[in-house]
Image (cartoon, helix red, strand yellow):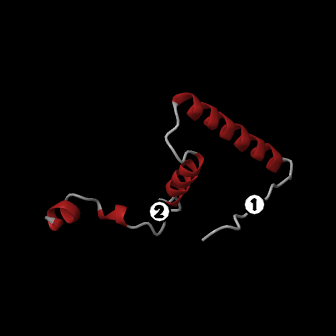
Amino acid sequence: YFYETYLIGYDMKSWNYYNNIEHITNNASESLNNSLNKLFPMKPNFYELINKLKEQEHLSYYDYQMKIKGIWRMKKKNKNKN
């Protein structure tokens, strides 16, 4: 099974990520998933979802504009970590 599936039917060049600069892990996806879980601890209704996403979009745009101007807002660290 392994031989037929991965050695014959699969391009082995795809296995090597050495020269690939793109994401080789799912850290970006996990980070987004983590932030969404914090944003929505429980399943919101449709209107709550839309309002919260609009708020996050605005905050992201605001942060982007401030960074362009050279103003960096530092994230507050959570002191209550277990």
Q: Is mark 1 on a helix, strand or loop?
A: loop
Q: Residue at x 63, y 37 (%)?
A: 52
Q: Which residue is drawn at 61% across and 37% down?
A: 53
Q: Nearer the viewer, residue 21 or 61?
A: 61
Residue 24 - label = 2
- Relative side of 65 to 8, left or right: right
Q: Do the residues labelled 1 and 2 touch (CB within 8 Å)?
A: no
Q: Name the residue under label 1.
A: 76
- How many angstroms separate mark 1 from mark 2 (CA)? 29 Å
Q: In which quarter of the image is the C terminus?
A: bottom right
Which of discs 1 and 2 lies nearer the camera? The answer is: 1
Q: Nearer the viewer, residue 50 or 19?
A: 50
Q: Quadrant of the N terminus?
A: bottom left
Q: Label 2 amino acid? A: Ile
- Relative side of 73 to 48, left or right: right
Mark 1, Cα crowd under 10 Å, few <14 / some 14-19 / many 20+, is few
Q: What element carries label 2?
A: loop
Q: In which quarter of the image is residue 74?
A: bottom right
Residue 32 lies, in percent from the top left, at 55, 51
Mark 2, Cα crowd under 10 Å, few <14 / some 14-19 / many 20+, is few
**Mark 1 or mark 2, earlier in chain:** 2
- Relative side of 35 to 76, left or right: left
Q: Label 1 amino acid? A: Lys
Residue 30 lies, in percent from the top left, at 50, 57
Residue 2 lies, in percent from the top left, at 17, 66
Q: Quadrant of residue 78?
A: bottom right
